[in-house]
């Protein structure tokens, strides 16, 4: 029980948001009399929120690196517009238009990165300028009109579904297969991670809790897959989104680059003095946001089947809100991709649920605003609480834990290697 | 004439875990210039903060009697109302505002919230005349040199009808002419009946103008010397400042010194914002393999600036001179290059420049040498754990686990994490800037042991410290630095606290 409490306390921010998401889902499930989790509605939920979730992934990285990007909506609109013009007026094949669109997004991101990292202008200003600039350029490119008549394969990016395979079961077979595979991979990874952490003597969930967690995850994924399979199958954007979550979680958790992003967000001066090329990291973070803005633009244009001068308005606000609801810290250094996705889903479910209940758009905005404020207030309160609980006493109360037995030999070898008595290459010339 | 304007009796001020002041007594006579001397960290500034209400009444024990009345200041406004004005070492002027605006900031000549600029400027002209500054009161303060800014600060103090003026290191940033001008001004104010308390490291100036000198050491008032009574010279002051036994606070160490490992030649560094101000002038120094070399200097002498300019030019502008490590001349323009070349710098500012406080021990230890843990793009987590555990055992870092947040560790354990971080980069030269600041005695002993072991392994170690006993106990050789100039080089055998202090307070720019 203590272990459970400790674990919960340690991750209260993340678990808190998952619990909040679950509560919101249950609330709307009841109040909409089951419409929320109808297969078709769940399918819509994914398709309609994909672009915000894509942007939230990039935004949380930008926020962890202590910046902000206000231009993502305008950049998305501009890239969507440019791609549409390429396909309709210049007859570019759809894949080339997509590729060039992503390239344009990346270039715009690099432009931001140049000003932010190398000239030293705050990202707020740079991207505020771009917000205006690219909204204007979108209107120029589209000559103020909506451009439709896009090729079918392009439109499928936004609202297509994976093809069906195998016998007719009444469900979408491929979707179920993917879900089973995903669950299997997830379980293998989680078990391996837990074993490694246990070997390192880190705190791990007690076994029964760990199993409960896996079972819950499996149930949620399979139920979700069942709902999708019962409708039209897994949307293509769903697959893209899933891929992005996996890739970016990996980048942020396991790569040197990810480490550097957290390091400069936590203390940019200390990172500089540790030899981190902070300018390059800032540049790449902003450039990546441009790439994802471009992708979001393509997805939006595809879903709407037309490039629209008003596309992407307020995307930046939704993406920023998603990152903060998902636990990112305004001061930088804190935040996760999965958190931002959960934050984005909270917003998405709120939107969808309130629409189903017939709540007017005005009230939806107001309620979302309050949710954002409460989520961040909770974060601040939680931080203050844990800061008070720590302090000098926390250290002496618990002396050094023994080093992990399973690594004892390796540590001993490393100890000898690290020992200051035996420098590896300091020559005594 | 010699009735005291100020008496501080039995002042004791404690911070969590540290007794900063212990039973300090200070008596300042009316109309005197009273100097306060002491080493860095002796408690001079803390005492002045107690006096001026920065630390409000109730947070310290003891009595302050000012003008015959017991003073209980709750904040700076109250002490200023009573006529006590403090001018801090770091000037508190706002660069973008004009002289007049700065003088009357917080004390505006206003009626119902509307400022009477005509009156403000007229009064500013009068005040500037009193301090001998011929400037238009509408000039933005950023256009003034540092010496003139100091005068604006004093004019600001005069505008508050000051009775007791406290100056913390007023001449630290000034050149000779400006310093002399300022000292003359203080004597002029004295004739007009204004009492001054002056904190300074420049003993020749103190000797020149002070009537009485109170010496503070280790948070205690040691003695008050009367200059008029005679017999007070720099040596006498120094003896009072450092008179303390060297306890057996250092592990045994037999140095094994090799050939010259690192050399700094003709190193000149300009201030990053003011590229004509020399922060370091023509410094030459060397470190041999296995040698611990100390740099002694007062605060503001340029110690950290010297270290950081060496460490990939992370400080300064127009840096000139050369660095030679292991027989090779180094061209360093970034920190990354310095680390790759084999230089490590442990900052004096552990929380600001040393650690990411929201990070855990494991990631902090590997932060400067992630390259060594990289396989492809990925950080090898298993090896990272092994490395962190290795250092935890080696350096005896006391923490529940290597996933503990470094923000929650004690100063000593935080410093061990920082040392681990730099040891893992496998440097040839380590520059340790105040390696034991804010660390308790037990952890200090351990850190001394680590430093000695690092030297024994053939590395060169450069130690910057404000604590002279630390340098004398640890170093094989010591350079003294004053006003950015290396004033002397001492062998361990010939250095004493007194001799070091003499060269640290020397007038180096002549």
Image (cartoon, coloured by chain):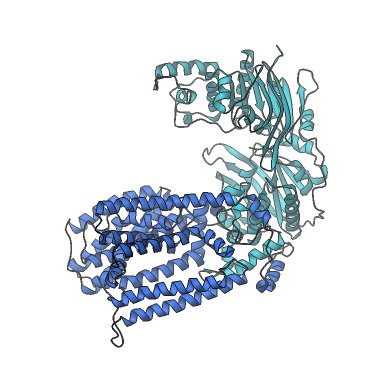
Indicate left or right for A301 with B431 as reference. left
Colour given to chain B in the rendered image: cyan
Indicate left or right for A55 with A253 as reference. left
Indicate left or right for A359 with A407 as reference. left
Q: Quadrant of the C terminus of chain A?
A: bottom right
> Picture coordinates of residue B7 (x, y %)?
70, 22
> Picture coordinates of residue A132 (x, y %)?
28, 50
- At horizontal 17% and vertical 60% (from top left) the residue drawn is A146
> Picture coordinates of residue B320 (x, y %)?
58, 46
Colour given to chain A in the rendered image: blue
Q: Is residue B289 visible?
A: no
Q: Is residue A18 visible?
A: yes
Total label count? 0
- At horizontal 64% and vertical 13% (from top left) the residue drawn is B191
> Picture coordinates of residue B52 (x, y %)?
61, 27
Q: Quadrant of the N terminus of chain A?
A: bottom right
Among the 4 quarters of the image, the one containing residue A345:
bottom left
Q: Residue furthest bottom?
A: A167
Q: Nearer the viewer, residue B54 or B325?
A: B54
Q: Nearer the viewer, residue A270 or B112?
A: B112
Indicate left or right for B291 with B166 as reference. right
Question: Residue A103, relative to residue B406: is it above or below?
Answer: below
- At horizontal 49% and vertical 23% (from top left) the residue drawn is B103
Question: Residue B507, relative to residue A420: is it above or below?
Answer: above
Q: Nearer the viewer, residue A252 or A164?
A: A164
């Amino acid at each position: 029980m203590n272990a459970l409490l400790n674990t919960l306390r340690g991750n209260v921010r993340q678990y808190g948001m998952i619990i909040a998401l679950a509560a919101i889902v249950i609330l709307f499930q009841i109040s909409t009399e089951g419409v929320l989790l109808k297969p078709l509605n769940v399918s819509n939920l994914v398709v309609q929120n994909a672009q915000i979730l894509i942007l939230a992934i990039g935004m949380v990285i930008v926020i962890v690196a202590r910046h902000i990007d206000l231009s993502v909506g305008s950049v998305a609109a501009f890239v969507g517009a440019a791609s549409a013009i390429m396909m309709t007026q210049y007859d570019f094949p759809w894949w080339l238009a997509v590729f060039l669109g992503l390239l344009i997004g990346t270039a715009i991101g690099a432009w931001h990165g140049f000003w932010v990292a190398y000239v030293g202008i705050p990202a707020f200003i740079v991207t505020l300028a771009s917000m205006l600039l690219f909204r204007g350029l979108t209107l120029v490119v589209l000559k103020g009109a909506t451009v439709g008549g896009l090729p079918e394969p392009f439109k499928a990016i936004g609202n297509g579904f994976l093809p069906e395979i195998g016998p007719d079961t009444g469900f979408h077979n491929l979707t179920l297969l993917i879900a089973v595979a995903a669950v299997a991979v997830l379980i293998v990874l989680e078990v391996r991670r837990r074993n490694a952490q246990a070997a390192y003597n880190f705190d791990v969930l007690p076994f029964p809790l760990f199993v409960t967690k896996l079972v819950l995850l499996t149930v949620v994924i399979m139920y979700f897959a069942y709902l999708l399979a019962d409708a039209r199958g897994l949307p293509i954007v769903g697959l893209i989104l899933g891929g992005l979550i996996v890739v970016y979680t990996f980048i942020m958790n396991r790569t040197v680059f990810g480490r550097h992003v957290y390091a400069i967000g936590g203390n940019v001066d200390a990172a500089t003095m540790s030899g981190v090329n902070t300018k390059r990291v800032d540049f790449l973070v902003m450039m990546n946001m441009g790439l994802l803005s471009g992708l979001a633009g393509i997805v939006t244009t595809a879903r709407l089947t037309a490039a629209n001068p008003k596309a992407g308005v307020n995307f930046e606000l939704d993406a920023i809100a998603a990152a903060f609801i998902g636990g990112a810290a305004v001061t930088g250094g804190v935040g996760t991709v999965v958190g931002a996705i959960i934050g984005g889903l909270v917003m998405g479910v709120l939107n969808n649920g309130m629409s189903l209940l017939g709540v007017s758009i005005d009230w939806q905005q107001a309620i979302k605003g309050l949710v954002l404020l409460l989520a961040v207030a909770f974060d601040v309160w939680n931080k203050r609480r844990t800061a008070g609980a720590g302090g000098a006493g926390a250290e002496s109360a618990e002396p050094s834990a023994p080093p992990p037995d399973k690594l004892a030999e390796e540590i001993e070898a490393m100890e000898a290697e690290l020992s200051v008595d035996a420098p590896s290459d300091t020559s005594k010339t | 004439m010699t009735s005291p304007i100020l008496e501080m009796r039995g002042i004791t001020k404690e911070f969590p875990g540290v007794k900063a002041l212990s039973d300090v007594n200070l008596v300042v006579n009316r109309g005197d210039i009273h100097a306060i001397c002491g080493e860095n960290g002796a408690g001079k500034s803390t005492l002045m903060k107690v006096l001026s209400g920065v630390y409000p009444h109730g947070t310290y024990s003891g009595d302050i009697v000012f003008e015959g009345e017991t003073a209980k200041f709750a904040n700076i406004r109250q002490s200023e109302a009573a006529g006590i004005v403090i001018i801090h070492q770091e000037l508190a002027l706002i660069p973008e505002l004009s002289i007049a605006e700065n003088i009357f900031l917080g004390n505006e000549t206003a009626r119902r919230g509307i400022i009477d600029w005509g009156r403000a400027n007229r009064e500013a002209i009068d005040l500037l005349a009193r301090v001998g500054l011929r400037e238009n009161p509408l000039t933005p303060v950023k256009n003034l040199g540092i010496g003139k800014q100091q005068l604006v600060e004093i004019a600001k103090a005069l505008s508050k009808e000051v009775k007791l003026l406290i100056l913390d290191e007023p001449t630290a940033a000034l050149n000779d002419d400006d310093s002399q001008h300022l000292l003359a001004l203080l004597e002029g104010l004295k004739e007009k009946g204004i009492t001054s308390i002056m904190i300074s490291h420049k003993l020749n100036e103190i000797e020149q103008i002070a009537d009485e000198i109170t010496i503070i050491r280790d948070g205690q008032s040691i003695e008050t010397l009367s200059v008029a009574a005679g017999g007070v010279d720099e040596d006498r002051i120094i003896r009072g400042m450092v008179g303390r036994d060297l306890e057996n606070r250092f592990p045994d160490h037999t140095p094994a010194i090799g050939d010259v490992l690192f050399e700094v030649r003709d190193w000149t560094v300009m201030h990053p914002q003011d590229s004509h101000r020399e922060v370091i002038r023509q410094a030459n120094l060397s470190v041999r393999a296995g040698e611990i070399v100390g740099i002694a200097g007062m605060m503001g002498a340029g110690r950290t600036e010297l270290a950081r300019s060496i460490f990939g030019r992370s400080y300064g502008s127009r840096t000139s001179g050369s660095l030679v490590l292991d027989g090779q001349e180094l061209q360093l323009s970034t920190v990354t290059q310095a680390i790759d070349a084999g230089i490590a710098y442990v900052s004096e500012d552990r929380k600001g420049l040393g650690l990411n406080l929201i990070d855990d021990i494991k990631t902090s230890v590997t932060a400067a040498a992630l390259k060594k843990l990289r396989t492809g793009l990925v950080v090898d987590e298993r090896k990272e754990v092994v490395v962190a555990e290795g250092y935890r055992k080696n350096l005896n870092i006391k923490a529940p686990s290597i996933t503990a947040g470094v923000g929650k560790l004690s100063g000593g354990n935080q410093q061990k994490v920082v040392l681990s971080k730099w040891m893992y980069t496998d440097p040839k030269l380590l520059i340790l800037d105040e390696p034991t600041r804010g660390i308790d005695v037990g952890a200090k002993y351990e850190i001394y042991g680590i430093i000695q072991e690092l030297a024994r392994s053939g590395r060169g170690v450069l130690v910057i410290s404000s604590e002279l006993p630390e340098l004398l106990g640890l170093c094989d050789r010591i350079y003294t630095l004053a006003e950015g100039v290396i004033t002397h080089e001492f062998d361990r055998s010939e250095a004493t606290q007194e001799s070091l202090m003499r060269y640290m307070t020397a007038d180096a720019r002549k």
